[in-house]
Image (tube, rainbow, N blue to C red):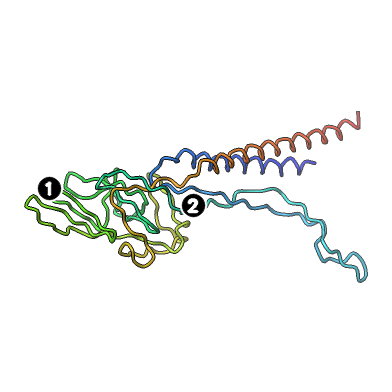
Amino acid sequence: MIKALFTLSTGMKAQQTYLDNVSNNLANINTTGFKRSQVNFQDLMYSNESKPGSEAGSGIEIPTGLQIGSGVRLNSTTKVFTHGTQINTGNQFDFSIQGEGFFKVIMPDGTDAYTRDGSFRLSGQGEIVTTDGLKLTPSITVPDDATNITVGNDGTVNVQLPDGTITNVGQIELVKFVNPSGLESRGRNLLRESPASGSPTISTPGEQGVGEIIQGFLEGSNVETVTELVNLITAQRAYEVNSRGIRAADDMLRSAASIVR
């Protein structure tokens, strides 16, 4: 009876964390380049009252056994890297990746970070940076007198000068990982390499399996409102069912305790 109380409590804790994950997905429904996370459940240890295949007597084998579980836990969260909606902004410094890959930026401590958020701007020195001021790498500097900037699907960056001359000022590169779901989320639309993600492979857009760059567009979040609302209801109902189970176990325990009265 007591075991049921603890087992059901793990279910309530798991559903609470599941709800936290759904809430984070819904909160980022308008976040540029955001990738939703899904949770993975895992059952806990089992007490084996009798093991499957053990002998019940001479030449008699138990076909199934008796195993009682101890509940559930959330094993991991997995980012789902399906493509978000392409949003036409018309801004010449907004870049969307049509396909796989990440932009590479450099953090203030000199380490690398990766993002699908292509909303870039110009710094005071003319360098292409994120909205937080992190430099795109390799670094690209736009001349002060440039009248127009054009980014090709292959990442080539050309600017037009006042005299009409077209000049190449750099090349945007994209990064690909063997296991992008293994990247470490750092907030601010940034991801970092981890042992699970593997080492980054740098490629020219449109080559080696990475996507092309589309100028004037941003990639929206891939959160599906209807799916997350269904997950929200599922978590709520599962939490409710587990709480009812605890109430039933408590009633049975109360009935057993009242026998001696």
Q: Residue furthest left?
A: 163
In percent of width and height, residue 149 lies at 19, 51
- Seen as rendered, the residue at the extreme right is 58
Question: Mark 2 packing: few (<14 Cα in 10 Å), some, or many (20+)?
Answer: some
Specify the label residue 93 is tagged with.
none
Residue type, mark 2 in image: Lys
Dot 1, crowdedness within 10 Å: few (<14), some or many (≥20)? Answer: few
Q: Tell me the quarter of the picture where residue 209 sits.
A: bottom left
Could you tell me residue 183's position as x and y percent?
Answer: 44, 55
Quadrant that contains the C terminus: top right
Q: Secondary structure at mark 1?
A: loop
Q: Is residue 223 left or right of residue 135?
A: right
Picture residue at 43% right of the left edge, 45% below the top: 221
53 and 82: which is toward the camera? 82
Per the image, label 2 sits on a secondary structure element best described as: strand
Q: Is residue 227 above or below residue 53?
A: above
Instruction: Give the residue displayed 65% in from the left and 40% down from the top.
Output: 12
Q: Which mark is residue 144?
A: 1
Mark 2 vs 1: CB contact within 8 A: no
Amino acid type at circle 1 is Asp
Report whether 12 appears left or right of 224: right
Q: Quadrant of the N terminus?
A: top right
x, y percent for residue 30: 41, 40
Question: Residue at (16%, 54%) from the top-left corner?
Answer: 159
In this view, the residue farthest toward the top is: 261
Residue 224, percent from left and from top: 50, 44
Position of residue 29 in the picture relative to residue 89 (left or right) = right
Cα–Cα gap, marks 2 and 1: 40 Å
Q: Which residue is mark 2?
A: 79
